[in-house]
Amino acid sequence: MKWLQIHITVEQAQVDFTETLLSSLGAVSVTLDDAENQDLLEPLPGETPLWNKVIVTGIYAQEDDEEIDVNALLTFITAQMPEAPLRHEFIEDQEWERTWMDAYEPIQIAEKYWIVPEWMEAPEADAVNIKLDPGLAFGTGNHASTFLCLQWLGKTDVKNKVVIDYGCGSGILGVAALLLGAKKVYATDIDPQAILATKQNAELNGVLDNLYVGLPEEFNVELKDQKADVFVANILAGPLMALAPEFATLIKSEGEFALAGILEEQVADVSNVYSSFFDILEVEKREQHWCRISGKRQNTHSNFE
C-alpha cells in the first residue's frame, strides 16, 4: 500500500472548509500543521488553537491493485480553492510511519535530564529520562513554556515532596517531578483527554502509583486540606491571574512555585497579582518572549494559610 498526501496552505478562516473538502474526497485522515513557524500558547484545556496560516494535509490510501486518479483529485480541489498553494507526494507504508516518528527526537533539558519519545533509546541510560508519547496531548517539551517549567523542576529540590501540577496537559511536568524524586504528585486539568494522557504517560514511566490526576472537582476532593511543597502551573496569563487566590491556598508557607505560558509583556501584570501572596524571586525568558515566573509562598498568617 502507498499513501498519497495532499498539502494545501490556507488562512486560519479556511481550515474548516479545507478539512471538510479533503474528507469528502475520501481522505482517511486530515492533519494540521504550522505554515509559518509560529509559536502557539500552551492551550487552555479543551481548546484547539490554530496558527494564522495552516498547512492542511489530506492522507489517502492507495491499494496495490487500485490507483488513485491524482490528476482528477487535484483538478477538483484547485477548482474549489483556486488561490490556495497545493502540493502532493506519495510515501510508502514504512516511510509513512517513519515520517511521523522522525518529527520527534530526544530533548535535553539539563545535564542528565532528557525527554525521550517512547520508541527511542535514551541518549544517556543513567540520566533522568522522561518517556513520552507525543500524540496524546499538548506538552512535549518542545514549547518554550513547557521547557522552562521542566528546567525549573530540574533545579528545584522536589525529593520526597508533594507537588501539584495545575493544568497538566500531557502530564509531562508531574511525571518529571516524580522521576526527579517527588513523593506524590497531584495533577488536574479540565480536559478529560489530558487526564487520560497524564495517566498513560505516568504508566509509561512507571510512576502512576504515586500520581493522582483528575478533573478539578475530583482533584479538590482528593487533595482535601493538603498543601503542596512545590507547585507548577503552565497555562495562560489570564487564568493564572484569576486563579492566584486559589493557588495561594494550595501551597505551604514558603513552598516553591513556578508559573509559565506568560508573554514577556504580561510579566508585570502577573507579578503584580501574585505579589500579594508570593515572593517572586526569578523571571526567566526563553525564545525571545516566553517567560517563567518563580518564587516562594509568603510566610504569613493571612487567611490563605
Image (spheres, helix red, strand yellow):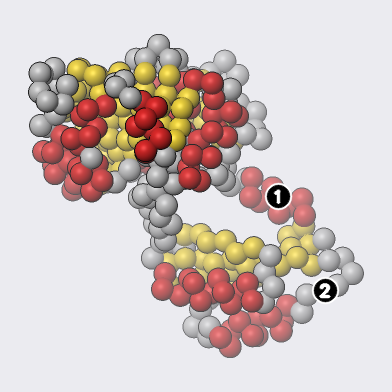
In x, y percent, where is residue 144? Answer: 37, 41
- Image quarter of residue 110: top left
Q: Which mark is residue 67?
A: 2
In x, y percent, where is residue 220? Answer: 34, 32
Give the mark nearest the N terminus, 1 or 2: 2
Quarter of the figure that contains the C terminus: top left
Q: What residue is at 68 percent from the left and 65 percent from the top?
A: 28
The alpha-carbon separation of the residues under discs 1 and 2 comes to 21 Å
Considering the numbered disc 1 on the image, is that residue within a helix, a strand or a loop?
A: helix
Q: Is residue 266 above or below residue 151?
A: below
Q: Amino acid at mark 2?
A: Glu
Q: Amino acid at mark 1?
A: Glu
Between 32 and 251, the one nearer to me in the picture: 251
Tell me, yes or no, if residue 12 can be seen here. Answer: yes
In x, y percent, where is residue 246? Answer: 22, 34
In x, y percent, where is residue 285? Answer: 27, 38
Q: What residue is at 19 percent from the left and 17 percent from the top?
A: 253
Left or right, 265 with respect to 131, comes to left
Left or right, 159 with respect to 98, comes to left
Q: What residue is at 27 percent from the left and 35 percent from the top?
A: 259
* Residue to which mark 1 is pinned: 97
Mark 2 closeness class: few <14, some 14–19, many ≥20 residues within 10 Å: few
